[in-house]
Image: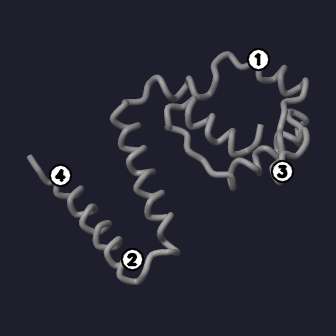
């Protein structure tokens, strides 16, 4: 499995609660490889494929509860919805950060500032 596929699976299994980046996943994969729990089992294009070793499978089998089950069931669906919406907003902003014109960037900043004020207004309501 590639690192990017792992990111997608982690997000899916945790109902979107665990969101991470390749920059944080690959050092952990290297740590697991150093401990002999996984091995890079080839390359698909420019991407490494990782597979658990026998020791890695044995370690995983000892776990009584998958980590995503320890977090996801107790999470309020409203929290998941809010986090998903925030992630989508951030993704849109990040996508256009380098390609937007000066005018577009100013409009994006205005939208972000208005959104922040609107959120504070909600908390000011009785």
Q: Residue furthest bottom?
A: 102
Q: Which quadrant of the figure has residue 117?
A: bottom left
Query: Toward the viewer: 99 or 79?
Result: 99
**Relative height, residue 96 to residue 4 (above, below):** below
The 10 Å Cα crowd at callout 4, few under 14, some 14 to 19, many 20 or more, is: few
Q: CA distance from mark 3 to mark 2?
A: 36 Å
Q: Secondary structure at mark 1?
A: helix
Q: CA distance from mark 4 to mark 1?
A: 47 Å
Q: Secondary structure at mark 4?
A: helix
**Of the residues tagged 3 and 4, which is closer to the observer?**
3
* Residue for point 81% across, 23% down: 59
In percent of width and height, residue 107 lies at 31, 75
Residue under pointer 2:
105
* Residue for point 39% across, 77% down: 105
**Relative height, residue 56 to residue 3 (above, below):** above
Q: Secondary structure at mark 2?
A: helix
**Of the residues tagged 4 and 1, which is closer to the observer?**
4
**Relative height, residue 14 to residue 66 (above, below):** below
**Residue 62 image label:** 1
In the displayed structure image, the side of residue 50 where residue 22 appears, left or right: left
Q: CA distance from mark 2 to mark 4?
A: 26 Å
**Residue 45 image label:** 3
Residue under pointer 4:
122
Q: Earlier in the sequence, mark 1 or mark 3?
A: 3
């Amino acid at each position: 499995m590639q690192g990017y596929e792992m990111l997608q699976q982690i997000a899916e299994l945790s109902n979107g609660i665990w969101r991470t980046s390749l920059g944080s996943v690959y050092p952990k994969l290297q740590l697991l490889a150093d401990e002999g729990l996984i091995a890079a089992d080839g390359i698909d294009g420019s991407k490494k494929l990782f597979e658990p070793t026998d020791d890695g499978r044995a370690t995983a089998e000892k776990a009584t509860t998958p980590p995503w089950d320890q977090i996801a069931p107790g999470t309020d669906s409203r929290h998941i919805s809010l986090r998903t919406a925030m992630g989508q907003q951030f993704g849109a902003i990040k996508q256009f950060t380098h390609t937007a014109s000066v005018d577009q960037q100013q409009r994006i900043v205005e939208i972000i500032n208005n959104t922040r004020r609107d959120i504070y207004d909600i908390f000011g309501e009785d």
